[in-house]
Amino acid sequence: MNLQDYKNQYLLYSNQIKQIENERDSLTYYSREEFAKLFQEKQKKDREWFIHHFDYIWKYKDYFYRHAPFKDIILDFLEVYYESGYCGGAAYSSCEVYISLSNLIQAWNKGFMYQGYPIIEYSESNYKGKITQTITYIKDNQEVTSEINNIDENLSKVRKLCIELNKWENYKTIDLLMRARRSKKWK
């Protein structure tokens, strides 16, 4: 192969890549509403499973924290950290919805707890100087939401453990944990 052949082959690959990228962009654009609906349904089911099986998750949390593939599971159904407000005439909001199982366990180990119960969501709202803090924690395999005052500063730092992902991409989900729960090893 000579230099011109390499350049031609490279150009051919570049054109194929552009065509595939255009097809991907079309898929995400034209399927976004249907995808969003399916994604929300899956998130709801995953959240219900997580809450219902929380005793199991809590019992094996140290194992899940240390061992692949469990530590890489992304919990895309929790709004781990949400911040909103109204300041200077403008509204703002920030929502970090992705966290790995190992990072959430790390947060619990560092005190992301409320009265001994693990927190799964934290939100803070600032409206005209009035700060409202709300948490959701798990107690007896039930979600409990509570408004609190003066939350420990360390609890709000969970945002640093959150990660950004494209929900169209493949990543390890709680389905892996569901399959492990059904296996005889974890009963």
Image (cartoon, grey):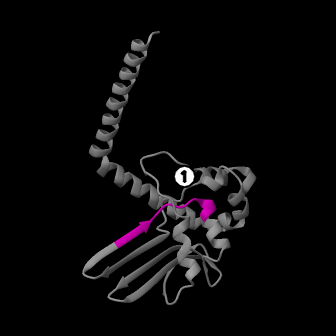
**Farthest top residue in view:** 1
What secondary structure is found at the residue carrying circle 1? loop
- The part of the image, by quadrant, that contains residue 18 is top left
Q: Which residues are magenta?
A: 93-103
Residue at 63% across, 61% down: 102
- Asked if the stretch drawn in magenta spans residue 102, the answer is yes
Across and down, in percent, residue 121 comes to 50, 73
Q: Which is nearer the eye, 140 or 161?
A: 161
Residue receiving disc 1: 173
Residue at 41% across, 75% down: 83
**Farthest front residue in view:** 3
Across and down, in percent, residue 127 comes to 33, 85
**Farthest left residue in view:** 89
Q: Which is nearer the eye, 76 or 4?
A: 4
- Amino acid tagged 1: Thr
Tag count: 1
- The part of the image, by quadrant, that contains residue 42 is bottom left
Across and down, in percent, residue 22 comes to 30, 35
- Asked if the stretch drawn in magenta spans residue 99, the answer is yes
Q: Is residue 44 left or right of residue 30?
A: right
Instruction: Classify 10 Å Cα crowding around label 1: few (below 14), some (14-19), many (20 and above).
Output: some
| Quadrant including the C terminus | bottom right
| Residue 70 vertical placement versus 154 (above, below) | above
Q: Which is nearer the eye, 69 or 96?
A: 96
Residue at 64% across, 55% down: 71
